[in-house]
Image (cartoon, rainbow, N blue to C red):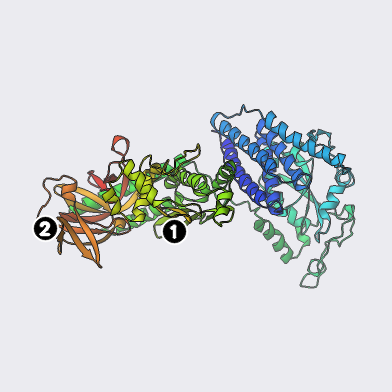
Amino acid sequence: MDEHRQIFIHESHEQITELNNSLLALESNPEDAEAMDAIFRTAHTLKGNAAAMGYENASTLAHALEDLLDEVRQGRIEVSPELMDLLFDGIDELEAMLAEISETGETTIDPEETGGEIRALIEAELAADAAADEPVEADAETVGETDEARETPDRVDGLVSGDLADALTTLAAGADDPLVHARVDVGDSDMKGVDGLFVLQAVEGAFGDYESAPPADDIEDGDYDEGFDVFVVADSPAVVEAGLDAVSQVESVDVTDVSAAVGHEPVVAESEVEGDTGKADDRTEAGADADTTTPATDDLDVEAVDEVTEKPDRAGMDDSISSVRVDVDQLDTLYGLVEQLVTSRIKLRREMDDLDIKKSENLDELDKISSNLQNTVMDMRLIPLKKVVNKFPRLVRDIARDQEKQVDFTIEGEDIELDRTILTEIRDPLMHILRNAVDHGIESPEEREAVDKPPEGRVKLTATRERDHVTIEVSDDGGGLDVDSIRTKAVEKGVKTQGELDAMTDSEVYDLVFHPGFSTNEEITDISGRGVGMDVVHSTVTQLDGTVSVDSEPGEGTTVSLRLPVTVAIVKMMFVRVGDTEYGIPVKNIDEVARLKDVHTVKGDEVIEHDDDIYPVVRLGEVLDEPAASRNGDGMLLRIRPEKRQVALHCDAVLDQEEVVVKPLEGVLSGIPGLSGTAVLGDGDIVTILDVVTL
């Protein structure tokens, strides 16, 4: 994929997500002017980007959406469920176009049907207004005509007294600052539409509303000569000139104060007329002739120059590059090189120990540098949770509307970061959980009102971080899980015996929903079923070295909790010997290491006591079938953290601790209980890493 297309795809996906979420905000509050403005700006940018890249189908559909949104913004079309459905359908079609463009470089999806529905709605509303004696004077773009009919005057005088006069008067109305004209020249450009688009985005980001000649659509299509004209309200012409000079696509810019030409009288502060030294400023006062140009920098005092040069930076027009996009494959390659560096460092350290070489300051320095590099690369892989969850509000909205339910969905902690691999893997499990919460958790408005609940249900996704773990909870205030029904189903399906169920707590019974195919719902829908897909949730989280649990209160709701590590792969490991074999156990899972002592036998099982809690002893030699393992009272005990698993592991000896690169088991070996992966040691030996949860 070429660079420009890759950037276009990436930015368009972000814009579609913004559109979805802003539309959801507008749907919940049709009076939300901020959401309406955000929707219109995003749709306008999406249309311009598509046109600049030559994707006419996408540009045409985005243009139709923009026109419809403009009618809504102007108050000529009311926000309604039918309107929102049409807007969401248009966005879904745009997303489908993007998928095709990403895969093949072009799209074959015809926007005529959806675009026709949008145009028909606009025309019907305009006709209804006219019939009600409230005529709406639509411009050429509103009724679907092209912008070619608009004239593009050549000179400033013609612009401020011609077609743009009314628009410029409106732009300057009520402003204290002057109306500034800028003639922007982009020179000989191979991508005039893209360059023009970047300039307009920079102008909008720095100065807000603007007018242009030719219109923005033509500029974004590259339909202009070497330059175009832009009008903004700003502190001074010098600020506009400095700001536009900082845009890399601009070859040259000429600015003029044109306030007088449209009858605008900006307010001039004393500091702008006279500097601190008492010397009068050479700038003209309000009401000066329209042809008066901005003085050269030499005519300004030092403080004024500072003001001019600082403001564009604060407005986001700094020409320094503060971030870059990195291809995921390149990031993975870098990560792989760091893994090799860590392994080589371990090899070197072990060789020195084997040769009885004294510690070297150079090797210590290498340890420090490689550790810092490792931490930096790990941080580069961290991505905010919102990259995944920001698509969920639309998912919840569509399911609720399909089920004719009312759902208030909120997200907290979306800025918490997780490793890219973990974030990618948990997306589908979280979708499973959310579908279950809305489809089978939240009751219908009638059912909720019958039990004195508000008709609108609540679903909440919350993320919190504690040290090197992140907990994600999805909770709802729906009907909850029936523990007795789960017990009955467990016996019917042969998952547990009645005796085993009697000995289980309610919390343990709730976790049975993770059993493959387990569901207490009599009715299976095409969206979800409580239990359908929950085994996938459990297996995915477990493979990521995390845990998942369910808590519920009948009639009050259900909470599904996922506890996940922040990062994966490079882990500090404690190595133990079992018989003649070496194994690794993640240090983060170990609470205490002690010699084997004070072991009691209860009903034939070995246990130890710690802080009045009982920890069953698991002899690794027996579990792993190591014939040379100790079967007597010798050895060491590793007490595992109770939140992970309340057991104590017995081994023959504890060897050492090291940071190693852990490779997950793949193929037929993946999913084996008790094993989580392998690690390559410095001497080339491959060591199996134990999973204490499934052991």
Residue where numbered disc 1 is placed: 465
Q: Quadrant of residue 135?
A: top right
Residue 653 visible somewhere in the drawing: yes
Residue 626: percent from left, percent from top? 15, 45
SS for dot 1: strand
**Disc 1 residue type (three-letter):** Arg
Crowd around label 1: few <14 · some 14–19 · many ≥20 (10 Å):
some
Left or right: 639 as drawn, with respect to 152: left
Q: Quadrant of the N terminus?
A: top right
Residue occupying the far left of the picture: 632
SS for dot 2: loop
Residue 247: percent from left, percent from top? 67, 48
Residue 616: percent from left, percent from top? 21, 57
Q: CA distance from mark 1 to mark 2?
A: 40 Å
Residue occupying the point 51% across, 44% down: 439
**Disc 2 residue type (three-letter):** Asp
Total of numbered circles in the picture? 2
Residue where numbered disc 2 is placed: 634
Residue 81: percent from left, percent from top? 67, 43
The one nearer the camera, 185 or 524, is 524
Q: Which mark is residue 371?
A: none
Residue occupying the point 46% across, 46% down: 433
